[in-house]
Image (tube, rainbow, N blue to C red):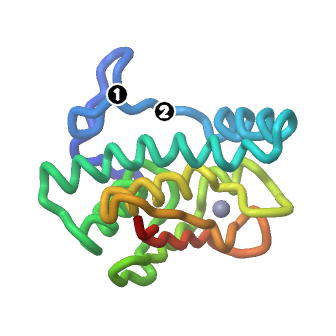
Amino acid sequence: MSETIPGLSCEPGRIALNGVRFLLVRPETLVGFQKAIEKEAPELAARALQAGGADGGGRSARRLRDDKGLRGRELVEAMCKMGTEIGWGRFRVESFADGAFTVVVESSPYAEAYGKAAAPVCHFLAGVMKGVGEALWGNASATENACAAHAAGTCQFRVRRISP
Ligand SMILES: [Zn+2]
């Protein structure tokens, strides 16, 4: 099955989604980067990768919030739709309440590329979800509670507001 992604433009040397530059990269490239950090500094990997995810995800979420006026569950739903469209897995909002939400991702490319793991590995995805939480509430934490690379069929992310 092949579907066109709305807002996607491809010209030589530049791919953009709704005017924002993206790049296509094999999941193995990012997972190779992740495993290299894990080998050198295991305690740093999850934190650093989550920070990268939160930077990119936060930019996208703030753009949807500020330009399209999306708030609350609508903003999380829009980010899940976008994540699915750009191939980061199949996202759905499992629950949403003021101060916390849960997103489930099927077919995470990171889990697939990583292979069997002793703990959840989708730190980029957790970071994106943290970025969404920060766009909603200012400060947020994100935890991957279940991971397809670890012991579950799907990946599940729990995001919570951090009170100042
Ligand atoms: Zn995962």
Q: Is residue 77 left or right of residue 89?
A: left
Q: Ligand 1 lies in which image quarter?
A: bottom right
Q: Residue at x 69, y 38 (%)?
A: 28
Q: Is residue 90 above or below residue 47?
A: below
Asked if the beta carbon under badge 2 is closer than 8 A to the nearest atom of ligand 1, the reply is no
38 and 24: which is toward the camera? 38
Picture quadrant where residue 82 is located: bottom left
- Of the 4 image quadrants, the one containing the C terminus is bottom left
Residue 4 picture location, percent across and down: 30, 47
Q: Residue at x 44, y 30 (%)?
A: 23
Q: Is residue 74 above or below residue 10?
A: below
- Amino acid carrying label 2: it is Leu
CA gap, disc 2 and disc 1: 8 Å
Q: Residue at x 31, y 53 (%)?
A: 61
Q: Which residue is mark 1?
A: 15
Q: Secondary structure at mark 2?
A: loop
Q: Is residue 50 above or below residue 108?
A: above
Q: Judge the density around disc 2: few (<14), some (14-19), many (≥20) Cα neighbours within 10 Å.
A: few
| Circle 2/circle 1 CB separation < 8 Å | yes
Q: Residue at x 69, y 49 (%)?
A: 46
Q: Which residue is mark 2?
A: 24
Picture quadrant where residue 14 is located: top left
Q: Secondary structure at mark 1?
A: strand
Total marks in image: 2
Residue 25 picture location, percent across and down: 55, 33
Residue 137 picture location, percent across and down: 33, 65
